[in-house]
Image (tube, rainbow, N blue to C red):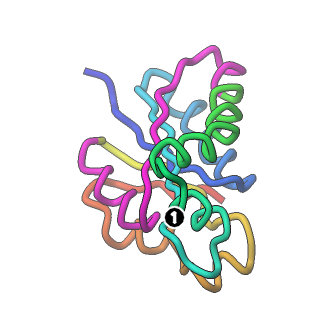
Amino acid sequence: MSLRVLVPMDDSKLAERALRYALETLPDAEITVLHVVGGPSPMMGEATRVALEDDAERGGDEAAEKLLETARDIAAEYDVEIQTRVATGHPARQIVDIAEDFDTVVIGSHGSSVVERLFVGNVTETVFRRCPVPVTVVR
């Protein structure tokens, strides 16, 4: 049975670096890239737009598609096929809950913007502290 690896991704370069790290260091693993579309809040315009759509799940899928396409392109550079998954809600909680189905998590050390880190909190730190499986933090 091969190692099951969860790689949460936002649109940051560190998230891409985490995916590349997983692909390079765990070449025989089953890698799943997860993008979490956050719940609605005044600070998260994209999440609010998605949450207000008639079909929020479809809206989340559309919002994540570009990011997941980038992830698939990166994996193709390594001649690897990855699985992709979209979740909606608080990013850290979703990652920790979903991680139960995996052997390990590989995550970038922080998100895409200073504003996001200030108002959303440090997702990586929360995942690191609460995750039920080993976590590798890539910087």
Magenta span includes 50: no
- Above or below, 12 against 72 in this view is below
- Looking at the rendering, which quadrant does residue 129 occupy? bottom left
Question: At 53% across and 62% down in the image, what residue appears?
Answer: 52
- For the residue pair 5 and 117, the one nearer the viewer reads as 117
Q: Position of residue 45 (x, y in %)?
A: 67, 69
The C terminus - image quarter: bottom right
Viewed as shown, does residue 103 lie left or right of 25?
A: left
Please state which of residues 11 and 56 is positioned toward the viewer in this rendering.
56
Q: Position of residue 12 (x, y in %)?
A: 72, 56
Q: Is residue 104 left or right of residue 79?
A: left
Q: Is residue 79 above or below residue 22?
A: above
- Say which residue appears at 25% left-offset and 59% top-offset: 132
Q: Residue furthest front?
A: 54
Residue 121 as seen in the image, left or right of residue 126: right
Which of the 4 image quadrants contains residue 92? bottom left
Whether residue 129 is situated above or below residue 49 in the rendered picture: below
Residue 123's place in the image compared with 60, above or below, is below
Front position in the image: 20 or 113: 113
Q: Position of residue 86 (x, y in %)?
A: 47, 44
State the image quarter where residue 79 is shown: top right
Looking at the image, how many numbered discs can be counted on the residues?
Answer: 1
Q: Residue at x 57, y 18 (%)?
A: 80
Q: Amino acid at mark 1?
A: Gly
Looking at the picture, how far across and down is residue 33, in whole percent? 51, 39
Q: Which residues, given as a range, are shown in magenta?
A: 75-101
Q: Residue furthest bottom?
A: 118
Q: Quadrant of the N terminus?
A: top left
Q: In what element is the residue under mark 1? A: loop
For mark 1, what is the residue? 38
Front one among 5 and 27 = 5
